[in-house]
Image (cartoon, rainbow, N blue to C red):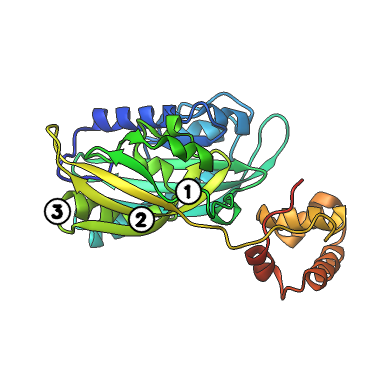
Amino acid sequence: MWHRRYPGNLEEWHRDLRSSTGALAGTDVALAVFDPLTGALLAATPGVAAVLGAELPATALDLVERGLVARPDLQAVADHLAAWRALDEIEGAGRESSHSWSTRLRAHPATGSVELAVDILHHRRPAIPAEAVVVTLHAGHHTTSTDAPNVGGILDRFWLVYDHQMRIVAADPRMARLGLAPEHQVGMLAAITVHPEDLPAVVPLVVAVINEQIEAAHYAVRIRGDQGWVRVQVELRRLLSPDGPMLVGAVQPLPDARRPLAPDALTPREAAVVRALFDGLRVATIAERDGVAVKTVRNQLAAIYRKLEVGGQEELLGTYTRPVG
């Protein structure tokens, strides 16, 4: 999924995507892979059906025809893909590329409408040629890098070994101490374990190491854990083996500088409002959910900011971890 020198073919690439997604079957991650050129569903975890409250669709269009997603929402994603594809054709010169963004959409399962946070990764591989769209759905709490566990002092570094296609072939057992189950990592394409917003900056560095353009790559990235995204620093180097080039990654967990709220710092109602902010909800959405006026929520937030001695929402989210509840 990363490497231009060994492009493979469409069938092999789809098989890699399916096997990588299958490695997440034992987790609650809701991740689906689509072919944007045909709309076909290539792979999905059981979590997708759980979030949608329905059987998996055969194609993206099935989501609309079954009333699970509104047509304008799906069209907005298609338009974004088309615009990126057109720009990539001009600037990319046929090179392998990745693009990602985050958005929100409303799903309509039988149990009632629900607003979802969505991470979308669009990957193009012109050498085959092929494209894939990896969609991760987050119902309720949307974990981000700031929600990662505090890992300071847990361990120094752990190790990952990749083949030339950036498939993880060996994982350090100590990863389990960070909520990164090694049995879920082995066999996966590394691109599926990395936060979609971080991947576009990482791909050129990885390709440069594989193609011997640079000796090593150093970058910070978020990788998927069983309890959220964990921020790590990676040093990636190329190895030689009888089966061809391989890579080894020395991964250093980065500590979370935020601090937890004291149990009695906020009232239960105020803690619920703060949790909603961490979940990405807007003030108007919180007010609608709780059946109160927008002004009421704003007054509650003003009181919260005074209690915690922060200047506003951004400082609150950057200073404290999400309240338990």
Name the mark nearer the viewer: 2 or 3. 3
Question: Residue 189: image x %, image y %?
Answer: 34, 37
Against 63, is 127 above or below? below
Left or right of residue 3, residue 45 in this image: right
Q: Which residue is at a point 27% across and 57% down the rendered structure image?
A: 217
Pick whichever, 9 or 199, lies toward us: 199
Q: Are marks 2 and 3 in contact (CB under 8 Å)?
A: no
In which quadrant of the rendered image does the C terminus lie? top right
Badge 2 or badge 1: first in the primary sequence = 1
Question: Is 261 left, or right, of 72 in this rendering?
Answer: right
- Residue shown at the point (58%, 39%) measured from the top left: 69
Residue 142 seen anywhere in this rendered image of the structure = yes
**Looking at the image, do the residues carrying marks 1 and 3 touch, with CB atoms under 8 Å apart?**
no
Image coordinates of residue 237 in percent, x first then y, are 24, 50
The mark nearer the N terminus, 1 or 3, is: 1
Label 2: which residue?
A: 200
SS class, disc 2: helix
Reading the image, the residue beneath label 3 is 212
Residue type at tag 3: Glu
- Helix, strand, or loop for circle 1? loop
Picture quadrant of residue 258: bottom right
**Comparing marks 2 and 1, which lies closer to the viewer?**
1
Q: Which mark is residue 138?
A: none
Q: CA distance from mark 2 to mark 3?
A: 20 Å
Q: Which residue is mark 1?
A: 155
Disc 2 or 3, which lies upstream in sequence?
Answer: 2
